[in-house]
Image: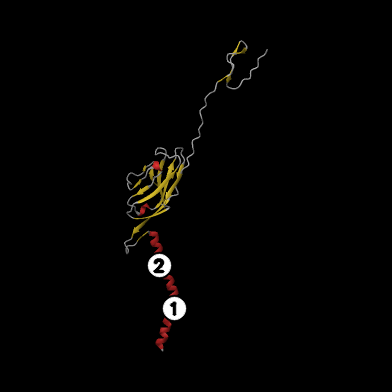
């Protein structure tokens, strides 16, 4: 009688003399181990920069805080940190790949512990040229870049005028407001002065 075999993919059945090998009652299935395709866990990274605005006086030390929050707890070898500044002259890189870009600029360096998520920037002996918006940037192992919202730094200059120390922008604003007030007073008081002068002349003629 004819023997029918139902062949399954990946299944070998032993056949002897035109009949099924009865010693192997069960079919022998060869399973090829496939490598498990594990999708890497996405980086859920959040960068926080504080404060949004900072003021300092010439010669002071400034700390610009930057923290990253991630459930993966990245190590120092997993991430690359970059700090850069933007001002009216454009963008200037200050710190890249966790080290200061310009060796001569020893006033700027990174503090904190990256393994704890702290990559704050310290600027020693600040000058008016340090004003601008500072950004903290991270490059992940997969090449993705995450950047903070930035911190705007303003530097106050000592003018030596009655001990006043304030930013140039504020001084200009105060002076402009003062000049405007004087002009308004002149416009308002001029008619009154004319009346007084006329009254004085009339009294003198009498």
- Mark 2 highlights which residue? 178
Crowd rating for badge 1 (residues with CA inside 10 Å; few <14, some 14–19, many 20+): few
Q: Which quadrant is home to the N terminus?
A: top right
Q: Callout 1: helix, strand or loop?
A: helix
Q: Quadrant of residue 20?
A: top right
Q: Identify the residue at image location x=41%, y=86%.
A: 203
Q: Residue 192 has which mark?
A: 1
Q: Residue furthest top?
A: 17
Relative image position of residue 11 (x, y in whole percent): 58, 20
Q: Which quadrant is home to the C terminus?
A: bottom left
User: In this rendering, does residue 11 appear at all?
Assistant: yes
Relative image position of residue 174 (x, y in whole percent): 40, 64
Q: Quadrant of residue 181?
A: bottom left
* Relative side of 18 to 155, left or right: right
Q: How far apart, in angstroms, are the residues tagged by discs 2 and 1?
A: 22 Å
Q: Nearer the viewer, residue 182 or 123?
A: 123
User: In this rendering, does residue 90 appear at all?
Assistant: no
Q: Nearer the viewer, residue 33 or 171?
A: 33
Instruction: Count all numbered tags in the image, as a single digit.
Output: 2
């Amino acid at each position: 009688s004819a023997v029918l075999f139902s062949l399954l993919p990946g299944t070998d059945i032993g056949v002897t003399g035109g009949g099924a090998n009865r010693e192997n009652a069960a079919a022998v299935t060869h399973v090829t181990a496939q490598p498990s395709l594990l999708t890497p866990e996405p980086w859920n990274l959040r960068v926080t920069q504080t404060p949004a605005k900072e003021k300092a006086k010439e010669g002071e030390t400034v700390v610009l805080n930057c923290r990253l929050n991630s459930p993966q707890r990245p190590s120092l070898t997993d991430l690359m940190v970059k700090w850069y500044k933007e001002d009216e002259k454009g963008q200037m890189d200050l710190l890249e790949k966790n080290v200061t870009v310009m060796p001569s600029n020893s006033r700027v360096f990174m503090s904190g512990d990256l393994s704890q998520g702290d990559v704050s920037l310290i600027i020693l002996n600040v000058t008016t040229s340090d004003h601008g918006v500072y950004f903290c940037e991270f490059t992940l192992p997969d090449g993705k870049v995450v950047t903070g919202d930035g911190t705007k730094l303003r530097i106050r200059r000592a003018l030596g005028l009655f001990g006043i120390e304030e930013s140039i922008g504020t001084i200009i604003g105060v002076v402009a407001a003062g000049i405007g007030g004087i002009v308004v007073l002149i416009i308002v008081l001029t008619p009154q002065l004319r009346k007084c002068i006329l009254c004085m002349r009339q009294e003198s003629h009498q």
